[in-house]
């Protein structure tokens, strides 16, 4: 049976740990000709820098070949071709499909249509499971554990798909505490709070975090997702709700690391970049090793 990765909950805790182990192996030795010329299609119906390029780097390092769409305006989607027909076609050309799409649920639909495995590279405001696996790898590398961590999620928790996937994945580990910091308009959707409550996992909601920042092991900053607002005035009102500055990090834990899926706009001041607790650029590099691991697991590469 083909192995898709659409939601982070498609993987078990054992699979999360297997991906972490494989990512560490690929970090040691990134160039391994495991794909042997197999073709991977990278279909990006929504803009991307890191996800597409780190996937394509991973495919190159695994000895695969790439076909793809980087701009939906240059594909037949612009002529009105349905996602169904695009996926039916591309699955005849490629051994694996990596897809980003603006609509929630599009990746699950593509996986139902496709006879070859589909990896979700982000669907609307729903899920971004490969980002979550690289986030977990980054947390494991910097904290030495995935247990007993106090994780602050800051910014756009409504539309930010990365935080949705990450809280579900971290819920598989011991004693996480989540602190959600957002404007009222962008708070964590109820479905994710219910998910945590059903697992008896503690979470707290705040509008500010300067008074509790000393408790954080991870601060996961997010961009306010301009492209998902129907009302531009509403975006203007919340776009600068949180800006993390170097001075705010003075009394934080030594093990604290600042993560961000990137791209950033204003939410992390550039004066944080040289702080040893800033980890977001290393996090983006971890995406190459983690995506090599995900491809190897999906394609059962030895
Ligand atoms: N983190 C992330 O998804 O970045 P891109 O939008 O650049 O792919």
Image (spheres, helix red, strand yellow):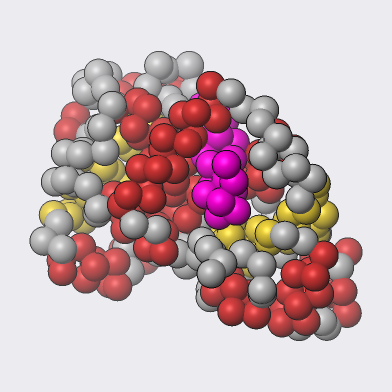
Residue shown at the point (28%, 72%) measured from the top left: 190
Q: Out of 161 and 139, give the one closest to the viewer.
A: 139
Residue 295 located left or right of residue 200: right
| 208 or 39, nearer to the observer | 39
x and y percentages locating residue 116 in the rendered image: 66, 67
- In this rendered view, identify the residue nearer to me: 53 or 253: 53
* Residue at 26%, 42% in the rendered image: 151
Q: Is residue 150 visible?
A: yes
Which one is in front, 128 or 261? 128
Magenta: predominant secondary structure element?
A: helix
Give me the residue at 46% from left, 29% from top.
Answer: 24
Q: Which quadrant of the figure has residue 50?
A: top right
> Residue 196: where, in percent of width, then height?
20, 63
Would residue 183 be seen by someone viewing this image from the given angle?
Answer: no
Taking the image as shown, residue 297 lies to the left or right of residue 177, namely: right
Q: How many marks?
A: 0
Above or below for 210 versus 223? above
Is 289 part of what is drawn in magenta?
Answer: yes
Say above or below: 164 vs 174. Answer: below
Percent x, y for residue 280?
48, 32
Q: Split into 4 quadrants, where in the image is the C terminus?
A: top right
Q: Which residues are magenta?
A: 281-302
- Left or right for 238, reference 47: left
Q: Position of residue 192 (x, y in %)?
A: 29, 66
- 60 left or right, relative to 293: right
Please tell me whether residue 28 belongs to the stretch shown in magenta: no
Q: Is residue 282 above or below residue 260?
A: above
């Amino acid at each position: 049976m083909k192995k898709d990765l659409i939601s982070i909950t498609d993987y078990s805790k054992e699979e999360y740990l297997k991906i972490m182990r494989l990512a560490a192996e690929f970090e040691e030795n990134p160039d391994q000709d495991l794909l042997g010329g197999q073709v991977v299609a990278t279909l990006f119906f929504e803009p991307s820098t890191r996800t597409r390029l780190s996937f394509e780097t991973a495919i190159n390092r695994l000895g695969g070949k790439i076909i793809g769409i980087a701009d939906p305006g240059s594909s037949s989607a612009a002529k009105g071709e349905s996602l169904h027909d695009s996926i039916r076609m591309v699955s005849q050309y490629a051994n694996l499909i990596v897809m980003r799409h603006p609509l929630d649920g599009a990746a699950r639909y593509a996986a139902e249509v496709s006879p070859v495995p589909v990896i979700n590279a982000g669907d609307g405001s729903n899920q971004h499971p490969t980002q979550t696996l690289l986030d977990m790898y980054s947390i494991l590398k910097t904290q030495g554990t995935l247990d007993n961590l106090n994780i602050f999620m800051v910014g756009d928790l409504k539309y930010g798909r990365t935080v949705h996937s990450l809280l579900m994945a971290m819920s598989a580990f011991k004693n996480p505490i989540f602190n959600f910091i957002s404007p009222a308009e962008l708070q964590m959707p109820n479905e994710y709070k219910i998910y945590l409550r059903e697992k008896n996992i503690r979470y707290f909601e705040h509008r500010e975090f300067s008074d509790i920042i000393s408790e954080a092991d991870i601060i996961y900053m997010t961009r306010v997702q301009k492209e998902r607002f129907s009302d531009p005035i509403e975006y203007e009102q919340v776009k600068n709700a949180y800006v993390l500055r170097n001075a705010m990090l003075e009394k934080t834990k030594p093990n604290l690391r600042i993560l961000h899926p990137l791209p950033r706009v204003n939410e992390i001041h550039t004066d944080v970049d040289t702080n040893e607790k800033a980890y977001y650029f290393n996090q983006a590099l971890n995406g190459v090793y983690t995506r090599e691991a995900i491809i190897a697991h999906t394609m059962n590469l030895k």
